[in-house]
């Protein structure tokens, strides 16, 4: 094979970079820990880990994890951040050093969690967000959840995001208990509350929606919002199965996130997303490979408000692609490869 022919093959395997639309990078430190029999007990360990974070530990740890993401094929990340403003700036510095595009999704927290998570008011939260914007940081509005943000906060934050044309990301319907508590407090399910308070629109990304009911999914579709699915984390925490088939039936856009960063591999997230759909439907090829790759890149970028992000190059000589017919390269990539198939992996 001549040099020119090799370049042509390599160019043909250049893809839009994967976009990690939902990451809590400090949680990488929790991988492998078996304590906590359910989400809520695991959350106690997560809160303890969060409580010990400093700007220095964030910068040092995030540089390493962002470098892992970059090597795994992610070229942009949405950092859903609730550790404090100084730590937010440290995350921005870490992303720049690791060479990954960052959108800082600053979490609004009125109640629950740790003291360091919380702001005194929506105005206090927006002041923090403006401090980031004033330093040129790309941001999104992120009411943490309906557990953390009451109705009046949601109304104000939804209004601000709409006025400023910013992405809005929010956890919703990840756990049955969350839904029960929301119903008891408001008489509405979480996504219904988001819709009623102006937090559900075309720039909204609902993270998880694992236990959303059909009416809630109809609201997401009507609003042209997206769902971010984080399959490896949702499996690790025992959240349940994402309603992939129902999302496809409603033409709801999907993106992916590494979330707790137990695993950092976009191909694994996409493979599991389709695996969930296949097991639920009892058939193969529920989501096309082209759609899966779109979920992994374009939809994630749109969720973060990105118009440009770096491509990623596949190593066509990787052992996992050896002997694959050229017509089957993309399906083989998604269903037969791990993240070490990308040039730069393992660095």
Image: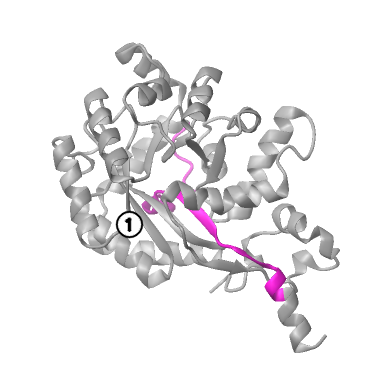
**Left or right of 214 on screen, residue 65:** left
Q: Which residues are magenta?
A: 10-37
Q: Secondary structure at mark 1?
A: loop
Q: Give how far across and how far down residue 74 sits, in percent.
A: 52, 60
30 in relation to 229, above or below? below
**Left or right of 228 on screen, residue 144:** left
Residue under the point 32% across and 27% down:
147
- Residue nearer the viewer, 54 or 253: 253
Residue under the point 45% across and 26% down:
175
Residue 120: within the magenta?
Answer: no
Q: Is residue 291 shown to the viewer in this render? A: yes
Q: Is residue 261 shown to the viewer in this render? A: no
88 in relation to 114, above or below? below
Q: Give how far across and how far down residue 176 sits, in percent.
A: 46, 21
The residue where tag 1 is placed is 138
Residue 31: within the magenta?
Answer: yes
Residue under the point 58% across and 70% down:
345
**Left or right of 304 on screen, residue 140:** left
């Amino acid at each position: 094979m001549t040099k020119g022919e090799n370049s042509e093959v390599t160019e043909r395997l250049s893809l839009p970079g994967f976009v990690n639309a939902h990451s809590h990078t400090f949680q990488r430190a929790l991988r492998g820990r078996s304590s906590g029999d359910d989400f809520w007990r695991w959350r106690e360990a997560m809160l303890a880990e969060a409580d010990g974070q400093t700007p220095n530990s964030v910068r040092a740890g995030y540089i390493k994890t962002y470098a892992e993401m970059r090597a795994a094929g992610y070229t942009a990340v949405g950092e859903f951040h609730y550790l404090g403003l100084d730590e937010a700036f440290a995350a921005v510095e870490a992303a720049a050093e690791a060479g990954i595009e960052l959108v800082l999704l600053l979490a609004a927290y009125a109640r629950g969690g740790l003291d360091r998570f919380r702001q005194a008011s929506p105005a206090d939260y927006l002041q923090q967000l403006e401090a980031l914007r004033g330093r040129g940081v790309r941001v999104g509005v992120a009411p943490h959840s309906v557990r953390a943000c009451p109705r009046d906060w949601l109304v104000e934050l939804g209004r601000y995001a709409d006025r400023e044309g910013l992405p809005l990301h929010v956890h919703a319907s990840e756990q049955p208990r969350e839904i029960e508590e929301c119903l008891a407090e408001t008489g509405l399910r979480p996504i219904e509350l988001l819709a009623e308070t102006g937090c559900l629109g075309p720039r909204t990304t609902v993270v998880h929606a694992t236990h959303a009911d059909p009416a809630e999914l109809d609201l997401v579709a009507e609003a042209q919002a997206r769902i971010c699915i984080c399959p490896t984390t949702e499996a690790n925490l025992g959240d349940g199965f994402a309603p992939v088939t129902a999302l496809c039936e409603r033409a709801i856009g999907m993106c992916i996130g590494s979330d707790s960063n137990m695993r950092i591999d976009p191909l694994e997230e996409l493979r599991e997303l389709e695996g969930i759909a296949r097991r639920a439907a009892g058939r193969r090829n529920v989501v096309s490979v082209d759609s899966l790759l779109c979920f992994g890149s374009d939809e994630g970028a749109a969720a973060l408000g990105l118009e440009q992000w770096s491509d990623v190059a596949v190593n066509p000589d990787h052992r996992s692609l050896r002997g694959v017919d050229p017509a089957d390269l993309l399906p083989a990539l998604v269903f037969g490869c791990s993240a070490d198939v990308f040039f730069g992996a393992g660095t």
